Amino acid sequence: MRELPLEKEDKITVVGAGRTGFACTRVLTELNGEVFLSEQGEMDREVRRFCRNEGVEFEEEGHSSRTLDSSLMVVSPGVPLDAPLVKRALKEGIEVLSEVELAYRLSPTEKLIGVTGTNGKTTTVELVNFILKKSGRDPYLCGNVGRPFIDLIPELEEGDEVVIELSSYQLEGTELFRPRVGVLLNLKEDHLKRHGSMRAYREAKLKLFQNQTKEDWALLGRELKGEGFQLRGPRVVRFGPSDSPLPLKGHYAKNLAAAWLAANCLAEEELEIELNREELKPLLELPHRLEFVAEVEGVEFYDDSKGTNPSAAAAAIEYLGDRPLWILLGGRLKGGGYGELSKEIEAHSNLQGVFLFGEGAEKLSSIFAERDVDWEMEETMEKATENAFRQATPGEAVLLSPAGSSFDAYADYKERGRRFQQLVEELAS
């Protein structure tokens, strides 16, 4: 376990009381840290109850000067590092750590696989976890995919293997974090409102490799070239769909290739196991990730609500091939890449039409106005779905792959996906 000021007299501020912040508070309290929890909005009832039962001081509905009465500040992924509160803390000499960095410094094991990329992270970590388990190991799976890394700390022992799904938000706050195996699947424009530029977004992702040495492995998608991708510290392996141990379609082959190589690199040997399509099917067909919903009056519906950026939507369209296709796009847009997506949609050999909805519809309409594409603008996803169904004919498909986040109308992509599937059920009835 690495050094961290966790004496009883030390004071630690945790900023953000969501899933990650709550986990940090629980673990730090268990380690005898004097924790103060600060939440910008309203706290969940369970978090408030924990704080009162454990004697943890807290505040909600805003951050007061009390947050600066500490020697360490731990920030949740949703808190930008350029937030005024974080800047003040740094100015006053308070060390600021992200949850991933904190967990790494406390972790007794160095056998970590970190997976990042614009798209495909969840599928890939699920595949790595499955492959390691099939080879007789007992890995932990954490990060964006489920439990925060910090939540595992009380359970971990030296030599345990941990697979972590990492976003750019989590990586940008790391300093010493060093995975034994780092995987960068791909890199497309995304989260530019948070990072400010594609360069800053790329630099956040590349922090995955910044501390690696020749003892470590860096796995990069074969198309990642140019600035930042010529790594000198770790052993570098380039991969693509052709490296998959099974012949799969499109990005699924690439994800399986990355997972297979990552598991073998961590094991430092070629795993003597055989994979088959049937056992991997539940991992490749995750909810709201190109999920087939139903066929209604001969029209197929696909839920790719997890496609929250242009490159994810483009991958979904490519996966469905040249079948006659109606596309639903919208939500809260996330920066650039929409012009490129509109070109790819225009080039689709059997495109029937595009429906734009939600907060980003107007901006998307100005982009599609320059394309030879039939498009319509609707206020909500519900109306867009109903209109697509009215116009579609048997043998055609309707794809929800919004290329935007759900936060203009839903709590998350899962809620949006569930609502889409409910709409399809209603159309069927």
Image: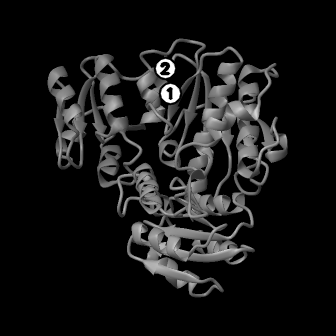
Q: In the rendering, at what x and y percent does residue 218 appear?
A: 72, 37
Label 1: which residue?
104
Residue 414 shows up from this direction: yes
**Nearest the eye: 252 or 269:** 252
Residue at 36% in and 64% down? 408
Residue at 61% in and 51% down? 119
Q: Is residue 343 left or right of residue 68?
A: right
Cα distance in 3D space between marks 1 and 2: 8 Å
Q: Is residue 400 left or right of residue 50?
A: right
Residue at 74% in and 67% down? 322
Image marks 1 and 2: residues in contact by CB distance under 8 Å: yes
The image quadrant of residue 47 is top left
Q: Secondary structure at mark 1?
A: helix
Q: Quadrant of the C terminus?
A: bottom left
Q: Is residue 13 above or below residue 401?
A: above
Q: Is residue 54 above or below residue 176?
A: above
Q: In the rendering, at what x and y percent does residue 44 appear?
A: 23, 39
Residue at 76% in and 39% down? 257
Res. 2 mark: 2
The disc labelled 1 sits on which kind of residue?
Answer: Tyr
Dot 2 alpha-carbon crowd within 10 angstroms: few under 14, some 14 to 19, many 20 or more: few
Res. 59 mark: none
Residue 73 shows up from this direction: no
The disc labelled 2 sits on which kind of residue?
Answer: Arg
Report the residue that reaches farthest toward the right. 242
Mark closer to the observer (1, 2): 1
Q: Secondary structure at mark 2?
A: loop
Dot 1 alpha-carbon crowd within 10 angstroms: few under 14, some 14 to 19, many 20 or more: many
Q: In the rendering, at what x and y percent does residue 107 appear?
A: 50, 21
Coloration of the structure image:
one colour
Closer to the chain start, of discs 1 and 2, is: 2
Q: In the rendering, at what x and y percent does residue 277 appear?
A: 74, 35
